[in-house]
Every structure is written in structure tokens, then in C-alpha cells.
Amino acid sequence: MTDSPPQIRLGKRERLVASAADLIHRQGAAVTTLAQVAAAADVPLGNVYYYFKTKDDLIQAVIEDRASGIAGLLATFEQRRTPAARLKALARHWENMRELIAEQGCPIGSLCAELSQRGDDLGRDTATLLRSLVEWAAIQFRAMGRRDADTLAMSLLAAVQGSALLTNSLHDPGIMTDQVRTIERWIDSLATTA
Amino acid sequence: MTDSPPQIRLGKRERLVASAADLIHRQGAAVTTLAQVAAAADVPLGNVYYYFKTKDDLIQAVIEDRASGIAGLLATFEQRRTPAARLKALARHWENMRELIAEQGCPIGSLCAELSQRGDDLGRDTATLLRSLVEWAAIQFRAMGRRDADTLAMSLLAAVQGSALLTNSLHDPGIMTDQVRTIERWIDSLATTA
DNA sequence: GTCTATAAGATGATAGAC
DNA sequence: GTCTATCATCTTATAGAC
């Protein structure tokens, strides 16, 4: 989930995916060139095609990397005792990334915003990232005894993603902090009135 | 604000801006080529440069077109009697665009998500679109007697933009309908407890 | 003001030596 | 498996005829 600078001591394939993820997060998938990715991963340009048949294949690998990042993140939250605590941990994760989001946007949200418009498999796979988060949140709300768990889950993710968009557009990490505080209070109010 | 198909009977400059706005909304600014814009506007490619010195100049014109669209939209809402009614009219506008958003995303949100990352003037100008909406909403919340008007305005725009992102990514206009209903109830609850 | 032709550069992808 | 060299294409932008 966190964008670590590409670790040079991984295998070439891993380095390419890490560099691509970082560059795509920074500038978008369309404007990121294979030459940039190859240079950042310290791999010769021609060699990229040994690991990935096309540019879209590389982007696909980035999406899968994000998917496993999300899975790992949600697994961490599962350790919290109450559903409300899990949901607040999710919101707080975006608050922790506020500086990164203000500079580069949300790694998941930007990807979905850019690739969802494409009608191909890449667009569908990207949407799965957001869907997994929504579904996980819905499970938590259901565990809180809420009948409207699906709508609440959408509201939570919409609030987080919308806050990230504003934080990035206005380049102000304070927005994320402020909004996550509001979100946490909202979750608490749902927990007590259930 | 609404993406009308480029009207062929406007002046060439207007046709170019309308076509560019439509194509950029559909596929993003980076992947939209001047050849596509020229073809859609029925203007020879080389002639584009008589009206716009560079591609960025054309994008700039699209941003200004969106800005005046927003201004016109907000002027419409001003006719409502209460601040709460104005805010709900704003939210309902996105609900009315739900089908378009599900297919192509929010015209403002997509543009901001893509261009905000750029550090140049274009990025700053795009952010102004969202800022004008936030500031207008803050004025309404302040008129409702809310001290936390700025935070509330951010929450409203975050909810609308986040809902649009989810609606587009998951290609489900029902999400927008559902979330706007929630937003309207939220505004009503603020109006009565102020 | 309008349009054709094309220059100049970048980019995805491949061929083929090692 | 790895890398160099290069092709074919696309894209922004310009030159210059009308």
C-alpha cells in the first residue's frame, strides 16, 4: 500500500513492478513510459519485454500488486476487537498517508479514476480494488448490526476517496486530517445508536 | 456543465473547445490527441494551431469552459429560498448526471484528478474548479449558522466527488442515487439542529 | 484566415547478437 | 536469460501555399 521507493535489491520483475507502481501513482498510467520505468528499475528497456509482453501487462501487474497490498492492510485491521475500531483503522490509514496524498493522490483512487473509463479488462480489474474495500467495510457495518451496511460502506469509501481527491487537488494534507476526524465521529455515532 | 455533443454550428474555436471537453471527459487529457479533437470538431488538424498555440492552451480553454459552466450552475441554485435547499440542489445535480458519471465519470472530478498532479499552471487552474464549489458551499453552511462551515463544505464535496468516483469505477448509477439521498438527509439534519 | 504537407521527436514493440 | 540497436507508428508542432 505505502509507496516505497523501488528497492534495488529485488529481482528485476519485482523492481519493474515497484517502479511502475511509483511512476503511475505520481503521473498516471497514460503518461508513464516504459523507458521511465526501465530507467527507474535499472533494467535495460528492451529487457522489459522479457518480463511483460505489453505495457498493459505491466500495468496489470501493478494492479495485482495493489490488490495484495490491500489484502495485507485489511488483514492488519482484522486484529482490532470491534467492527467500529476496524473501520476507524481503515479511515486512519488514509490520514496517515495524508502527505503522500496531498502530493500525489491516493494510489488506489487515482488508478481507478484513470483506468475505469477504459472498457477493457484493465478497467474491470482496477475497479476490483475499490470493490474489495467496500465489501470489507460492509461486513464490518453488518457486524455492527446495521441493515443498511452496503450504503454505509459506500458512504465510508466515498468520504475517504472524495477527501483524498480534495486533499490532492488543493494540495492540503489538513483536509484529510479534518475529514478523517469527522468520519471517525460518524462511525462512533453509528456504533452507539445501533 | 452537461456534456452536450459538440454543436457543429458554432464557431470553430467553440467547436474545438466543446469537442476537447467531451473527449477529455471520456478518455482523459493525456490520451486525447489533437487529431481526435480536430476530427470531432470537423476542423483540419493544422488549423487547430491558429486558435490554440499548444495542446495545453486548448486544455486551459476547456478548464475555463468548465469554470463558466460551474458559475452558471451555482447562479441557478441561488434562486432557492434557503441555504439548505441550495445545497441539496447542488447534490441533486450530480444525481441527475448519474448515468453520465457511471459511464464517463464526473467532468470536474476526473479533470482535477488527472491534472492536479501536474505542478504547472494547468494543475492550479483545475483545482480552482473544485475550490469554487467548496467556497460556495461554505457560504451556504455559514448562512445556516454553522461555525464549522468550511469543514462541512469539504465533507459535502468529498461525499459528492467520492460517490462519483465509486459510481464511475463500479459503473453503477444507483450508487450516486443512494448516496445523494443520504447527503440530502444529512443536510436536512444540519438545518434542523442548527 | 484557412488548409496541406511535413518536420521533429517520442514511444511501444521487435529482431537478433551474445 | 540479457541486452543493443532499431523499426514503425503516432503526436505535437511548424512551414508555407492559397
Image (tube, coloured by chain):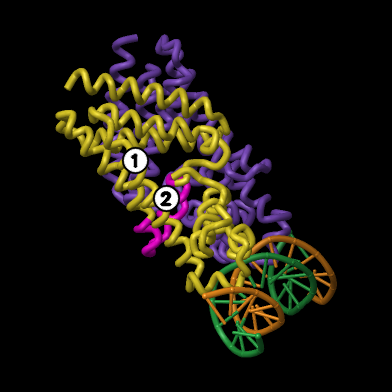
Chain colours: A yellow, B purple, C green, D orange
Residue at the (47%, 61%) spot, across then down = A59
Q: Numbered disc 2: what chain?
A: A
The relative height of residue A159 versus residue D14 in the rendered view (above or below) is above
Q: Numbered disc 1: what chain?
A: B
Characterize the local packing of mark 1: few (<14), some (14-19) or many (20 or more) Cα atoms within 10 angstroms.
Answer: some
Q: Name the residue type under label 1.
A: Asn
Q: Is residue B8 visible?
A: no
**In the figure, residue B161 lies in which quadrant?**
top left
Residue B118 location (% of width, % of height): 62, 45
Q: Name the residue type under label 2.
A: Cys
> Which segment did they paint magenta?
A108-125
Helix, strand or loop at mark 1: helix
Task: Residue under label 2, please give it.
Answer: A112
Task: Residue under label 1, please give it.
Answer: B96
Q: Is residue B190 left or right of residue A94?
A: left
Residue at the (49%, 51%) spot, across then down = B25
Q: Is residue A2 visible?
A: yes
Magenta stretch secondary structure, dominant: helix
Q: Nearer the viewer, residue D15 or B31?
A: B31
Q: Quadrant of the image for the C terminus of chain A? A: top left
